[in-house]
Image: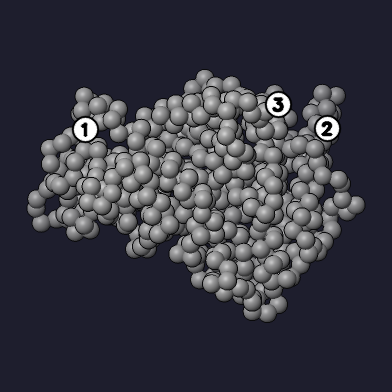
Amino acid sequence: MTRSPQHPPDPLPRATPLHRAPPPPLADDTAQLSHVDAESALAHVQALYAQGVQRLHAALHELVARHAQGATSPAPRVRAFYPRVRVEVPGHPQVATPAESPASFGFVSGPGVFETTLTRPDLFAGYLREQFELLLRNHGSPLVVGPSDVPIALPFTFDEHTSFDAELDAAQRRDLLSCFDMPDLSGMDDGIANGTFCPAPGQPRPLALFTAPRVDYSLQRLRHYTGTSAGHFQNFVLFTNYGFYVEEFVRLGRELMRSPAADAQDYVALVEPGNVVTRRAGHPGLPGDASGTPPTRMPQMPAYHLVRADGSGITLVNIGVGPSNARTITDHIAVLRPHTWLMLGHCAGLRSTQQLGDYVLAHGYVREDHVLDEDLPPWVPIPALAEVQVALQQAVAEITRLHGLELKRVMRTGTVATTDNRHWELQPFGGPLSTPRLRFSQSRAIALDMESATIAANGFRLRVPYGTLLCVSDKPLHGDLKLPGMADRFYRERVGQHLRIGLRALEILRGQRMERLHSRKLRSFDEVAFQ
């Protein structure tokens, strides 16, 4: 999660109950209050949310008690509402010029009223504080905080340790549906991110890409797909399509945990599926980061986290093979507003001059994955981001210790094609009709995989900086097929180096100011203010 560099890091809620000690109660939790200070606005949001959740939980306990006492009369309906922040900009926004302020976010695009609903202000405290500060600094208009008219769904208020409905009988479940709000998918679409949302006349315009229900939905999905709590995710994310990278990441992480930290900026913990926490030698740990238990079976897309106290560590997710998984996981991780995500994986080399083990740095993408066509038309170009490209190239040079022509011999920059057809090479090569081979040749593609363009396109769509560095593992057009013996040898020789390159690239990016990464290339004409 993004945390403001101007403030000390918030304690990370590692595998703790969803709601800790609530802020002091409000005299009137229905009031709309104006704030000219980010800290007071954040405290107001936290108080509203905590009191709403407490109201729902108290009503649930009362419902269970009524059934235990044999009550037959209908239970009363109980509702709580997400907090909302609103800002009104009366005239055309006057913000610093790009030369004075390199940030591409933190301001609205025109005069009007802007608002968004908010959830989990404990988890997003640093992020919200920063967005509030930027709005106040850039516009000077007060932030109005109060309850919205969007109800909080009861299931979204419990963490992974609480199976609140596991012990309910059929009658209690019926009462649950009639007494509480349940998740409503109609309010969770990506119209804002896709640029298709059109507010009705007089309706405020959005401040953020995602509404509170959409964020809550993704937080729940992340736990399901990755086997770890959302609070463990770090600001820099690696995706891979092979378990060999996971093995090397865990090995490197455990090795780091055995050596004492050199300074406060080092990694302090390794978190594995099941929220299993290995703390750094000599490090006392973070508040509430009690270790979980390994899962009885691995989740679909397991996540592993090298944690820094300020959240600027590295998360690795094994997304498996295929664009569907790539789209699914990036849809959900995007609500955490990571600083960068990179794809590290294997690919088919399409050129005769490539060798097995060569690297491919993607500077363009051919999208034949089809999983994002309805949200981002295939004709939309997905640009390379200069800061990410430079960091990846620098990392390859540092880890391989090659430069100039020697570096060019092992790393080629070019277009990567992504397909949803795992056996594209079995399609006919000749004939008058368009074939994969012909299309990829016309596009000048130098490599092909099943995930990279999906991850890059969803980063473009959801305003998350992205990059791709692949390793050639086979050349099917030239007779080098990925056969078991050859593949095993290749994995042993290349995975460790490839992973270290990815880790080093993210460390380079971490050293840059965050606003430089969130490029204006990712911003639309009428962009929301929140990063």
**Disc number at residue 482?**
1
The amino acid marked with disc number 1 is Lys
Badge 2: residue crowd in 10 Å (few <14, some 14–19, many ≥20): few
Q: Which residue is mark 2?
A: 62
Q: Is residue 198 left or right of residue 391?
A: right
**In the rendered image, the vertical position of residue 254 relative to residue 83, given as above or below:** above
State the residue lying farthest toward the bottom.
91
Residue 162 in sight: yes
Q: Is the Cβ of the residue at disc 3 closer than 8 Å to that at disc 2?
A: no
Q: Amino acid at mark 3?
A: Leu
Q: Please name the amino acid that badge 2 sits on.
A: Glu
Residue sitting nearer the eye, 6 or 459: 6
**In-image side of 113 versus 77 (left or right):** left
- Is residue 467 depicted above or below 472 in this figure? below
Q: Nearer the viewer, mark 3 or mark 1?
A: 1
Q: Position of residue 444 (x, y in %)?
A: 21, 57
Q: Quadrant of residue 144?
A: bottom right
Mark 1 and 2 residues: CB-CB less than 8 Å, in contact? no
Q: Give the left or right position of residue 35, taking residue 4 as reference.
A: right
Q: Position of residue 190 (x, y in %)?
A: 53, 56
Looking at this view, name the residue that lies furthest to the top.
296
Which residue is at 46% across, 34% downward? 301
Sequence-wise, the earlier of marks 3 and 2 is 2
Could you give the CA–CA distance between mark 3 and mark 1, rounded to whole angstroms?
51 Å
